[in-house]
Image (cartoon, rainbow, N blue to C red):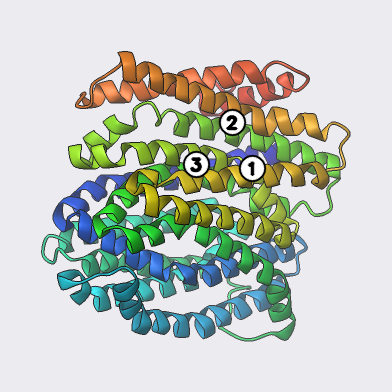
Amino acid sequence: MKSGSRLLANSTWNALAFLVSVGLNLLILPFVVRKLGVASFGMAGLVIATIAPALIFSGSLAMMSTREFARTLAAAARHETRQFFATALFLSLAVGIPLAGLFWLVGPAFAQRVFHLGGDLAADLFAAFAFGALGWLFQCIAGVCLALFTAHQDYARLALVNVAGSVASTLSMLLLIPQWPQPSTFMACQMIGFAVNLLLSILLARLLCADVVAFPALHSRSLVTLLHIGKWQALAQGGGLVAGQAERYLLGMFLQPQNVGYYSIAQRLEEAIYIGVLKIGEILFPFFSAMQGESDERVGDLFFRASWILNVLAVTVLGALIPVAGNVLYLWTGPEVAAEGQRVLIVLALAGILGSGTNVFTFYLLAKGRTGANAAIALITALLTLGTSAMALPYFGWPAAGWSSCAGALAQMVVMTLLLRRSFALPDVGLRVWHFVLMPIVVGVVGAILLRVWITNYGIDQGAALWEVAGYYVLSAVAILMAVIAVSSIGPYGAVCRRDLYRIVTRFLPARSL
């Protein structure tokens, strides 16, 4: 009960930080698109996509640092934590600075040639890459400090850092973009947010863990450990990068920057909801890392119960977007984007639901050090995503955008299902996989599609008022939630689902003590 309460508290902090950050992001995006134009916003998306390969290093370093911090802190081996911190910080600088310089120097010529950029857009590339590369470097260094908060399961401070960065970035956009409406200004505002994250994370890390925060230094044992586990995580990050950016790369190569802009807008909305679910669930990574000595039955019970809760949440909030996708885009960014991006948003929402089904398993594999399995899943996903995009976009054009993400997420689900049966030595593991992992997704997707058909035929018009769209979204979310809960209440694990749902509801209601 105590561990479950702690998980809920951590998820609450993550959810609150996410809601503030994503709320600011979604509110500012129509302003940015209106000031820059869809083509310039699309070019900024291409710059971000070009720099994205650097996330293979920074993401892997942050994840592996979190795992080792959590493991050594749980064993009270704080001198080891200090060595891991110093080594990780050294790597962030020793590798991060040359990588940032490389993208700054080579990126503009690469983007201009591959994405066929010309005119005023090409003239702004050098400044855009300069700000983008520097922002990534700040993000890379801050990731080491933030890993301490994650490992310590101090999500209150983590939330404070993330919110402060989002506020700084949003205020910068309001002040600077009207003065200099260029893609490089948008990149500079993002860089300011990362700079605030870095400064605040360093300050709070010294307050939280002064005895483990150290200057950059190279410790051979820590380096070997990080590199040994990190090589597979880097491969997994690379596969995830290809899966996440393939559509944007190929849209830039075969179509126009404005198509990248339409796709980026639709993806930003879907991604905001998807990352919200991910943020709520990512507290399981350090939690699983600290459970190394627990029995397989105990870990398996937590795994499947957490999977059910997060899958129910994912199909509820993402599934409810499918029936009102066009109306939301119309209210958010106008009729042009709604007409172009509606179908893509629906497909991306389906991909997000499927992708959410594998999140808990990803955290479990990371905590267990099974990064090779994560790499295999990521590579299979990347190959299907890239292959589908490469075949579909040149022949079907813009309407095919998004289907590759759906194909990759489906492949990810299939591989996860096969690996799950081998990961837990439980007699009823197959039934648990169906009840806790697959069934909520199947019921939620079917419900969302049926609601889409009903609302399209008998529901609201494209230009409906905000309160109407919000009402239909809430109605769809409630209908999907009730359907999933009703089906999940049947069977041998129905009582477990009802009990966990009751605990969550009573925690957040005023009458929780009853």
Q: Secondary structure at mark 2?
A: helix
Asked if residue 135 lies left or right of residue 334, the reply is right
Mark 2–mark 1 CB contact (< 8 Å): yes
Kind of residue at badge 1: Met
Q: Residue at x 55, y 72 (%)?
A: 57
Above or below, 70 against 498 in this view is below
Kind of residue at badge 2: Ile
Above or below, 341 against 166 in this view is above
What residue is shown with label 3?
352
Above or below, 434 against 332 in this view is above
Q: Secondary structure at mark 1?
A: helix
Mark on residue 174? Answer: none
Asked if residue 210 lies left or right of residue 174, the reply is right
Q: Residue furthest front?
A: 395
Viewer-proximal residue, 371 or 401?
401
The quadrant where residue 400 appears: top left
What residue is shown with label 2?
441
What residue is shown with label 1?
413
Q: CA distance from mark 3 to mark 2?
A: 11 Å
